[in-house]
Image: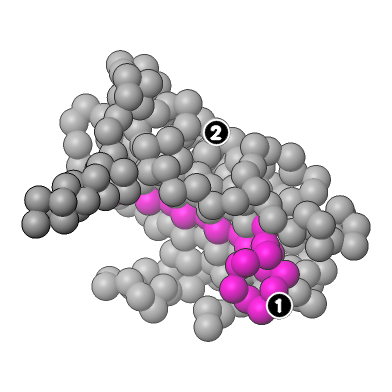
Amino acid sequence: MAIKELGAVTFQREHMLKRPMQEDLPTLEDTDEHKLPALNKLLLQMHALHAALKTLGIQPQKDKDDQYPNDNLYLLQDADYQGWPRFLIRLKSNWFDPKYPIALHGGFYFHLFVAQDGYEGRYEIADWINIQIRHVNTTPLSFVSWREHIRTLGFFLREQSDSYFYDIPMPFQTGVSFSLLSDGMNFKTEALNLAVDNACTVMQKIINRGQFLRAATEE
């Protein structure tokens, strides 16, 4: 019985419990005041995207999974990538609307997900970027971010230019990480700045490819 219990403790330590090191802990440099320039940059790019899509006649739609649905979701496809098993651009935030009346500390949420799947729509062979930025109800450290950029199409591309991400170089991994402390949602200003920079880069590419964009629906 003792051996079984020891095994359970060992499993918890190795796979469940996250023991932060000093470098994982937030500092005064990770408070909100240091994050406001990045958030301002993000909002300006979000509103530029909103204006560009509105000009194209593409309107935000309601997320069917929301408890209180709002017109805050863009689902887009790109005509140059419609031959892939799955290609989807997904952007969601109430703050895409410049007239949205709620302040940033009223539950700000931004999500960008772009996926180019090369195999049966299962993301086993795919390139994708997934960014989330949100405000959580803690004091004084509140704005958090999560960023995952995976590129695994690589060898399977006929030409590197076949990848949606080929001309937007940014840090990426070649496999999914399960290290929640280093790669998960965190308070770090450095991580938020990277997430914002990458999100703005991707949104600018979406704007630049306006002529190829089409509204999509979720399956």
- Helix, strand or loop at disc 2? helix
Q: Which mark is residue 75?
A: none
Q: Is residue 62 left or right of residue 46?
A: left
Residue 182, compared with residue 101, is above or below; it is above
Q: Position of residue 62 (x, y in %)?
A: 42, 74
Residue kind at label 1, given as amino acid type: Pro
Please give the name of the residue rendered at 64% of the width and 42% of the height, measured from the top-left corner.
Answer: 172
Q: Is residue 83 left or right of residue 8?
A: right
Verify whether residue 123 appears in magenta: yes
Label 1 crowding class (10 Å Cα cut-off): few <14, some 14-19, many 20+?
some
Q: Is residue 19 left or right of residue 139?
A: right
* Between 20 and 33, the one nearer to me in the picture: 20
Q: Earlier in the sequence, mark 1 or mark 2?
A: 1
* Between 31 and 4, the one nearer to me in the picture: 4
Q: Quadrant of residue 116?
A: bottom right
Please give the name of the residue rendered at 30% of the width and 16% of the height, measured from the top-left corner.
Answer: 28
Q: Which mark is residue 194?
A: 2
Q: In the image, which residues are magenta? A: 106-127
Please give the name of the residue rendered at 21% of the width and 51% of the height, measured from the top-left corner.
Answer: 7
Please give the name of the residue rendered at 69% of the width and 56% of the height, measured from the top-left corner.
Answer: 152
Q: Which mark is residue 85?
A: 1
